[in-house]
Amino acid sequence: MSRRTIRRSPALLAALLVLLFGPLAACADEAPTPLAATDAPAAPATTPEAAPTGPTTPGGGPATPTAASAVLPDVTGARLSDAEAQLRAAGFLSVHAVDASGAGRAILEKNNWLVTRQQPAAGAPAALGEAVTLSVARPTDRQPGAEVTSGVVPAVVCRDLQDAQDALREAGFYLLLPKDGLGQGRIPLIDRNWIVVGQSAAPGTRPESSEKIELTVVKFGEPTGNSGCPS
C-alpha cells in the first residue's frame, strides 16, 4: 500500500506544478499593447486672436473719425427763404446772409431777397458744421434810378413802393394811392415789401400837382402781370 503511493507521487507533483505556475507563464508571455494614437493626451486648445475690425492707421491703430461732409447744393438765384431751407435739408445749419450791395441793409423779410452768390461754391464738398455765406439782393436793385424833374411824373414801375413814392414826392406829387394788384384790397404796411407794377399817370406827363396818382402794387414773390417786373 505504501509503495504504490510513493510511486505515484512524482506524477502528482508534476500536475500540481502545472496547475500552479502555468497561468503565470502565460501572463509573462503577453506583451503590453501600445497606446493608440487616439489615446495620446490632447494638446491644450488655443483661441485664435480676433482680427481688428474697422479702419486702421498705417501703424495698426484705429483711424481717427473725420467730420461728416456733404456736397453743397446750388441755391444761386433762389429766394433767401427757399435757399436756407435747401441748405438745411442738405445738413448745413449755419447759414448767414449778407447784403450784396455792400450798403449793410437789414434783411428782415427773407422773401424779398434773392441769392446772388454763395460761399463755399455749389458742388464743393464741405463739412456739415461749416458756415455758408449767402450774398443777397432785392429784385428791385436791378432797376435804374428814377430820373426826377420837378412837375414831371417819373417812371416808377418795377421799383419798390417806398422808392416810387419818394421819387413822386420829389417831383412834386403828394396825393399817392397804393392799390392791391391782386384785387384783395390789401393795404401796404411796410412799403419796401411791395413792388409797383403800374402807375395811373404816365411817365413824362405834367399833371397838376394836386392830381391823385394811383400805384398798383404786389408783394415780392407774387405775379407782376404784364409789367415784366422781377419779383
Image (cartoon, rainbow, N blue to C red):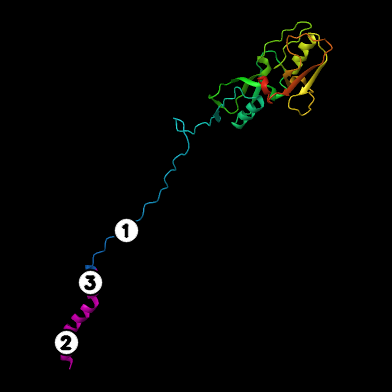
**SS type, badge 3:** helix
Report how far apart the C-alphas of labels 3 and 1 lie in the structure.
29 Å
**Residue identified by numbered label 3:** 26
**SS type, badge 1:** helix
Magenta segment main secondary structure? helix
- Disc 3 to disc 1: CB gap under 8 Å: no
**Quick one: 217 or 61, which is closer to the camera?**
217
In percent of the image, x 22 and y 71: which residue is there?
Answer: 26
Q: Which mark is residue 38?
A: 1
Residue 157 versus residue 7 in the image, above or below: above
Q: Position of residue 59 (x, y in %)?
A: 44, 30
Decide which of tag 3 and tag 1 comes sooner along the chain: 3
Q: Position of residue 5 (x, y in %)?
A: 18, 89
The boundaries of the magenta stretch are 1-27
Report how far apart the C-alphas of labels 1 and 2 lie in the structure.
56 Å
Which tag is nearer the camera, tag 3 or tag 1?
A: 1
Furthest toward the bottom, the residue is: 1
Decide which of tag 1 and tag 2 comes sooner along the chain: 2
In percent of the image, x 46 and y 31: which residue is there?
Answer: 57
**How many marks are shown on the rendered structure?**
3
- Label 2 neighbour load within 10 Å: few <14, some 14-19, many 20+: few
- Disc 3 to disc 2: CB gap under 8 Å: no
**Quick one: 97 or 200, which is closer to the camera?**
200
- Label 3 neighbour load within 10 Å: few <14, some 14-19, many 20+: few
Residue 15 seen from this side: yes
Report how far apart the C-alphas of labels 3 and 2 lie in the structure.
28 Å
Q: Position of residue 164 (x, y in %)?
A: 75, 14
Q: Picture quarter containing residue 79?
A: top right
Identified by mark 3, the residue type is Ala
**Residue identified by numbered label 2:** 8
